[in-house]
Image: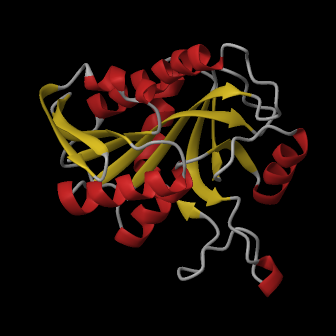
Amino acid sequence: MIGIIGAMQVEIDGLKAMLKDAAATRISGIDFVTGRLHGHEVVLAVCGVGKVFAALCAQTMILRFGVRAIINTGVAGTLCPQLGIGDVAIARQVVQHDMDTSPLGDPVGLLSGINQVYLPASSTLSNLVAQVVGEKGMNYKLGTIATGDQFLATEERKRWIHSTFDAIAGEMEGGSIGHVCYVNQIPFAVIRTISDDADGNVPNNFADFAAETARSAISITAAVLERLNDEQELD
């Protein structure tokens, strides 16, 4: 079974509409919808915004539904000049930019207990995503996606995250999903369509625009599942 997580309803609704034999189970306030999509058993969930909701959702998918991989799909703000609105960021690795025990002598972003700053995404899934996006003719970049419990809205913070972690995009869930997957040894992927510039210049119709860009991420995720072999080894 493959788990697919989005923070907002618009990031999951399109996939839910494609499901066959859909059935919902509510756990800890989150609706987990199981079914079949392009021949795969999947479980979809809207986790809610932020790291705690995302981690709760990922852990439930692993323990309750026994997923063999998790795909996190949605939108993000760009942190690099190579990605503009409508482009796609694909995680080679994730980092939590708001994790900071540096006053104790640790590197910024260090995750205490596992002593890692960067957590690697599945290269198999990430490369498959890149192949799908490239064939769709969309501009994309593979790199570090940075996660924190804040909507990035200043040029200063944007520059700091990019320069500190060499991050290509910023959002609020992928790093915590990666954290949960890392400690459970579950492969994961993070796909983000760029919805804003992460510098405070948010479109007035951001909700509508986020829905539009989320649809791109949904089509990418569906195409990845269409190509993924159930027997394929995921690293």
Q: Residue furthest left?
A: 21
Which residue is at a point 50% across and 44% down the rendered structure image? 190
| Count of numbered circles in the view | 0
Coordinates of residue 96 in the picture (x, y in percent): 64, 60
Coordinates of residue 157 in the picture (x, y in percent): 84, 48
Coordinates of residue 188 in the picture (x, y in percent): 41, 52
Front-most of 34 and 38?
A: 34
Which residue is at a point 76% across and 76% down the rendered structure image? 107
- Regarding residue 161, the answer to whether it shows in the image is yes
For residue 27, above or below residue 183: above
Q: Residue furthest bottom?
A: 104
Is 55 positioned to the left or the right of 222 in the image?
Answer: right
Front-most of 187 and 19?
A: 19
Q: Quadrant of the C terminus?
A: bottom left
For residue 46, above or below residue 180: above
Q: Residue furthest right?
A: 156
Is 18 positioned to the left or the right of 115 in the image?
Answer: left
Is 196 positioned to the left or the right of 13 in the image?
Answer: right
Q: How is the image coloured?
A: secondary structure
